[in-house]
Image: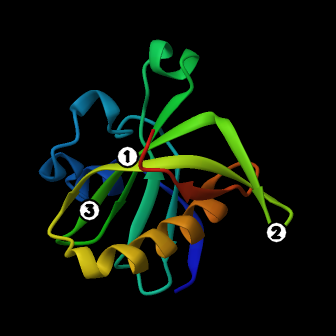
Amino acid sequence: MAFLKRKLEADEINNLKLDQYGIEERRIPSKAKGWDFAVSENGKEYFTQLLSSSFEMRDGNYWYLYFTRDKYCLLKVEAWGHVKINCRNHVKGKIVSSGLIAPEEMGDIQSKINEAMIVVSYNNEGVVFDPTM
């Protein structure tokens, strides 16, 4: 699945109804004009960085959301924990909650999250999943 980087306007973000996934309102980038999203070619899968407080960012924790119409994963990323894989930097990430994703789907979802992270991150970083975070 290919993802494309696209800026969504505030009204487009509001129409996605991110609060239905249990995302705190303070994390939803609804007022951020031109917020970057990785959007699948078919327009049915999305991935974006959520807003983090200054305290969280100082600690190196960033939050991302992968979602479709009926499934989601909330991803916590350790910004300072880089790992180099095949000449590309990867950040360490951990899925902290997910909705309606069966265990047998998780490998495919993690692969999509990695691809979307490369597209949406400023340094084209992938993500390696570390359940010990």
* Residue type, numbered disc 2: Asn
- Which quarter of the figure has residue 30? top left
- Which quarter of the figure has residue 28? top left
Residue with the mark numbered 1: 10
Element type at mark 2: loop
Q: State whether residue 114 is above or below residue 51.
A: below
Circles 1 and 2: CB atoms closer than 8 Å: no
* Residue type, numbered disc 1: Ala
Q: Position of residue 118 (x, y in %)?
A: 65, 63
Identify the mark nearer the N-term, 3 or 2: 3
> What is the C-alpha distance between the residues marked 3 and 1?
20 Å
Q: In the shown orientation, is residue 9 left or right of residue 114? A: left
Element type at mark 1: helix
- Relative depth, front residue between 111 and 36: 111
Residue with the mark numbered 2: 86
Density class for disc 1 (Cα within 10 Å; few <14, some 14-19, many ≥20) is some
Identify the mark nearer the N-term, 1 or 2: 1
Element type at mark 3: strand
* Residue type, numbered disc 3: Tyr
Q: In the shown orientation, is residue 123 left or right of residue 28? A: right
At a point 45% along the width and 38% down the height, the residue shown is: 133
Q: State whether residue 49 is above or below residue 15.
A: above
Residue at the farthest front position: 132
State which mark lies toward you, 1 or 2: 2
At a point 49% along the width and 50% down the height, the residue shown is: 130
At a point 59% along the width and 57% down the height, the residue shown is: 127
Q: In the shown orientation, is residue 67 left or right of residue 85? A: left
- Which quarter of the figure has residue 23? top left
Residue with the mark numbered 3: 72
Q: Position of residue 112 (x, y in %)?
A: 48, 74
